[in-house]
Image: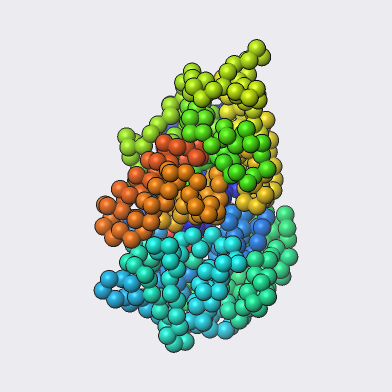
Amino acid sequence: MKDSLKYIILAFSSIVLFFLPFYLVTPDDSKIKNDVIKKVDVSKFNPQIGIEGGILKRALSGDPKTFNPAMAQETTSTAVIGDLFNGLTKTDIKTLLPKPDLAEKWERNKDGTVWYFYIRKNAYWFDGKPVTADDIVFTYNEIYYNPDIPTSAKDVLTVAGKPFKVEKVSEKIVKFSLPKPFAPFLQALGQPILPKHILEKYVKNKTFPSAWNINTDPKNIIGTGKYKLVEYKPGQIAIYKRNELYWEKDKKGQKLPYILKIKAQIISDPDVQLIKFLSGETDIYGVRPSDLPQLVPKAKEKDFTIYNLGATPAITFIVFNQNPNAPIPKYKLKWFQNKKFRQAISYAVDRKGIINLVYNGLAYPIYTAVTPANRRLFDENYYPKYPYNLKKAKELLISIGFKEGKDGYLYDKEGHKLEFTLITNSGNKERESIGNILKDDLKKIGIEVNFQTLDFNNLVSKLMSSHDFEAVIIGLTGILDPYFGQNVWLSSGHLHMWYPNEKKPATKWEAEIDNLFKKAAIELDPKKRDMLYKKAFKIIGEYQPMIFIAAPEELIAVRNKLKNVFPTVWGWYKDEMVYIKQ
């Protein structure tokens, strides 16, 4: 399930969020696919009453780095623990509007600065203790707003730079006071609520960031969600059982979710995931475009359906390290901090070639962090574009002082050869293919690229901890509202990848983006608010701190024994009502 409240670093896209690149679509192939692959329209879907029972078999793309939802920053972690926790609110996948979750209802004053949330009377932790206002106050005041706990949630839980004031009114009522009206407030409250009676001791002894690490017995991870994690074997499997205390029921009074158990094999190699799906060992598979020649002919025989969910909100990009505190040569830092250098690299990215070769034609070229899935903000003609042009790329590099040497490579004014190390996560064949294409194209204009692949968790450590990288191909999940990307786009953001946690904006353009995001957070007029975000993403498109490549279409294959199935790019609609036809 996608996290709609903040950007998360992607190991593998759920699209293929992320193979073999050399299959091209022909007109005949397209006709076959149109006959076999289903498009989805959530507005026409109404789930039916199902039956309890069965085991869902699925795959996870990697081991988690943590079981602690407040510390998780990558999909390998959130995919494992996502169904274990709830926020006060959640997003209705059909309307894309907030709806009740742990809070059964809410009230507010006229200007939207004071809110009261009423916690469900039948909401319980896995250990049987009731969820109370103490848990909500603890989660926000002691965890999300704790300066000693480096959680990304902090970036999206402020308005005008100030936190919400969170107070207990009674056992089941909590009060939020805001310094100003805040447009995406209800969506912000989708952050996971955590148990005070379990985690308070870790906050007090200042060990919370390491609490619920991957060595923790799954039985000690206490949430409120639809499923409980009951077993975890690194590199092998995660097993879940239905939470019998979960409050949701269907119209007949049957407990939800219908499915009683989930077995999730941990399979980092997408090729192996495909084999497991075709052999019947898993029920759901995130389809890569290159898989279609194998999957389409077998859909009837193997009894599954392929769904095309349309353009994903997720983005794939290259980011150069602009952090002055990073352990990289200062002369390279000077290159990477130059706007024209980054624009030159952007012109050297053959997006259309990558889309055809890597994504089998099923993707969209992007030049900023907005994809066709972001219907409010996507505008073909508004954002700067960098069409593939190696001549222009080289001219830009020459204009900032690089000169061609006798060996054909470019050198800066100090005689340093223009070369850098580009990394990505091993096993992700799409990114590996993109890296190899980019390496070959950049060599044509005199740039030597040392392309390497790393284990995903090692890659994340370099990005988020040691900052020991020069350039990386990586991805981010999509978001429903740009505000929840503040942990990436604000200069102070924890996921501001090119230079995270800036004490003050390092550049005028970053300061302007900060200003636009802060204005948008308190702008209640939807059209004015969207325009503020569009201006911010236009600046991002101009300065190319990330060199955006493509937004693939999302494809997923699902066994036909699963009923009430309706996947979307924002998550599965009414996933608790999916059932298995015995």
| Image color mode | rainbow
x and y percent of residue 337 in the render? 54, 37
Q: Residue furthest top?
A: 406
Image height check: is 252 above or below 386?
A: below
- 327 to 1, vertically: above or below: above
Furthest residue to the front? 414
Residue at the far bottom in the pictured view: 170
Front residue of 184 and 12:
184
Depth order, front residue of 161/291: 161
| Residue 272 point in image, percent of width and height | 67, 44
Q: Quadrant of residue 89?
A: bottom left
Q: How many numbered discs, if any?
A: 0
| Camera-side residue of 94 and 428 | 428
Residue 53: quarter of image: bottom right
Q: For the C terminus, give its image quadrant.
A: bottom right
Residue 281 shows in this picture: no
- Is 542 on the left-hand or right-hand side of 68? left
Q: Is 255 rendered above or below residue 66?
A: below
Within the image, what quadrant is residue 329 found in? top right
- The image position of residue 275, as x and y in percent, is 65, 44
Q: Nearer the viewer, residue 16 or 145?
A: 145
Residue positioned 26% across, 74% down in the render: 110
* Left or right of residue 215, residue 40 in this image: left
Q: Image point 62% across, 33% down: which residue? A: 332
Q: Residue at x 61, y 58 (%)?
A: 77
Residue found 43% across the figure and 44% down from its top: 508
